[in-house]
Structure formats: structure tokens, C-alpha cells
């Protein structure tokens, strides 16, 4: 039996790389398969050409496929690699964001509202009134499909739009919705009697 010093493939986060390297090469892949099917290391590498045998043994050991105490397949390899590379579960709206962008909209209505509320909070200040190109630019930071995101925000009453769709404002709090006043009213400070 060929024995090499034990290598802990879970000692670093890239531990799976040597395993993939072993599986990418035909001779080491076939020897690994024989190991996994119950062969000893000597039996697994016996069919490998003599000129390549030492390299295949090194590759199998580097991949952590061989239990150095038995010379057989190390069945603890996969669980150890998975445990070493466990990704922490994301919580809250972060479950639906990747790099700050919406990866998917939640099916659960409460979770969807929570996500949209956070997007509205991050994208628009409470006192802002934005025209359509400006709101689209802000929402593009969260989604490629700004029209869908904008529609969701309006439908969930987190974003209010003028009847003609030219301006948008964030709805703040649970009270009555804020009316988006036409630009000329905001500039002169007058109040219009008609609701938009």
C-alpha cells in the first residue's frame, strides 16, 4: 500500500479545488471511482500506467479522497468540505437581494411588502418628488426591470404617482397618502383643489 501524509482538505475554503482537479483527469477520476466503490488505494491505481501511477496517488491524496490510516476512500471528505464551506443563511430582505439588487420577488405577500418597503426607503427620500426618468434611474440600482418594480411600489402604496405618470413620491407612514402636487404648485406654493 502506498501511504502519504494526511492532507486536510477542509483547512482552507478552496478545499474542493483539488477534488475537482482529481475528477477532471481521466486516470485519477477512474482511480477515484474504484476507491469509492471499495477498492484499496493499491487496487485503485493498479490499472493506471506505471509512469502515471505516482502522480495519480499524489492527486488522490491531495484531494483528500484517501483515508491515510486505511488506504481506502475517506467517506468523511464530502461532509467535511461542506461544513467548511457553509454559507451563513441570510435573513430579512437580504434573502431576496444579491449585491443589493433584487434576485427574486418573494411569493409571500408580507415578505414582498417588506422587501418593497426597504427598496422604497433606500431609493427615495420622504420629501422627494421625482420625474419618471429620475425614479427609473434610482430603481435601476435594484432591478433591471424598473417598470415592474415601479408598478409593485405603486400597487403596494409605497410610491404614489401623478395621474399622468409624470411624477412620483414616496408614501410615508401609515396615514393618508401624500398627494403628488404638480410641479407648478410646488414652485409657487399654491394648493390645487383637485386631487391628482
Image: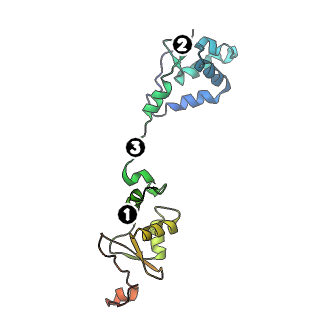
**Residue shown at the point (36%, 75%) measured from the top left:** 128
**Residue shown at the point (45%, 82%) measured from the top left:** 163
**Looking at the image, which is closer to me, 56 or 195?**
195
The kind of secondary structure element at disc 2 is: loop
In this rendering, is residue 19 above or below 180? above
Residue beneath label 3, please? 89
Asked if residue 98 shows in the view, the reply is no
Residue beneath label 2, please? 71
Left or right, 47 with respect to 5, comes to right
Q: Residues within 10 Å of mark 3 (few under 14, many from 20)?
A: few
Residue 21 location (% of width, % of height): 59, 30
Q: Gap between marks 1 and 3, in whole Å?
A: 21 Å
Q: Earlier in the sequence, mark 2 or mark 1?
A: 2
Q: Gap between marks 2 and 1, in whole Å?
A: 58 Å
Residue 189: quarter of image: bottom left
**Looking at the image, which is closer to me, 8 or 172?**
172
The kind of secondary structure element at disc 1 is: helix
Residue 30 location (% of width, % of height): 65, 22
Residue beneath label 1, please? 117
Quadrant that contains the C terminus: bottom left
In this rendering, is residue 6 above or below 123? above
Q: Residues within 10 Å of mark 1 (few under 14, many from 20)?
A: many
**Looking at the image, which is closer to me, 195 or 127?**
195
Q: Are marks 1 and 3 in contact (CB under 8 Å)?
A: no
Q: Residues within 10 Å of mark 2 (few under 14, many from 20)?
A: many
Residue 192 location (% of width, % of height): 35, 90
Q: Earlier in the sequence, mark 1 or mark 3?
A: 3
Residue 182: quarter of image: bottom left
The kind of secondary structure element at disc 3 is: loop
**Residue shown at the point (47%, 80%) measured from the top left:** 166
Amino acid at each position: 500500500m502506498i501511504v502519504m501524509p494526511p492532507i486536510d482538505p477542509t483547512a482552507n475554503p478552496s478545499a474542493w479545488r483539488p477534488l475537482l482537479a482529481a475528477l477532471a483527469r481521466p486516470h485519477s477520476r477512474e482511480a477515484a471511482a474504484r476507491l469509492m466503490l471499495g477498492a484499496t488505494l493499491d487496487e485503485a491505481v493498479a490499472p493506471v500506467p506505471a509512469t502515471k501511477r505516482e502522480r495519480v496517488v499524489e492527486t488522490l491524496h491531495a484531494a483528500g479522497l484517501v483515508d491515510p490510516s486505511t488506504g481506502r476512500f475517506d467517506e468523511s471528505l464530502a461532509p467535511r468540505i461542506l461544513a467548511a464551506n457553509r454559507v451563513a443563511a441570510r435573513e430579512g430582505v437580504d434573502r431576496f437581494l444579491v449585491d443589493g439588487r433584487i434576485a427574486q420577488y418573494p411569493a409571500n405577500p408580507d415578505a414582498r411588502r417588506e422587501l418593497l418597503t426597504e427598496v422604497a426607503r433606500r431609493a427615495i427620500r420622504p420629501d422627494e418628488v421625482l420625474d419618471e426618468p429620475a425614479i427609473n434611474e434610482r430603481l435601476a440600482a435594484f432591478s433591471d426591470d424598473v417598470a415592474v418594480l415601479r408598478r409593485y411600489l405603486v400597487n403596494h402604496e409605497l410610491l404614489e404617482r401623478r395621474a399622468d405618470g409624470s411624477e412620483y413620491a414616496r408614501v410615508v407612514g401609515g396615514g393618508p397618502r401624500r398627494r403628488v402636487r404638480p410641479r407648478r404648485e410646488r414652485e409657487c406654493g399654491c394648493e390645487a383643489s383637485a386631487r391628482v
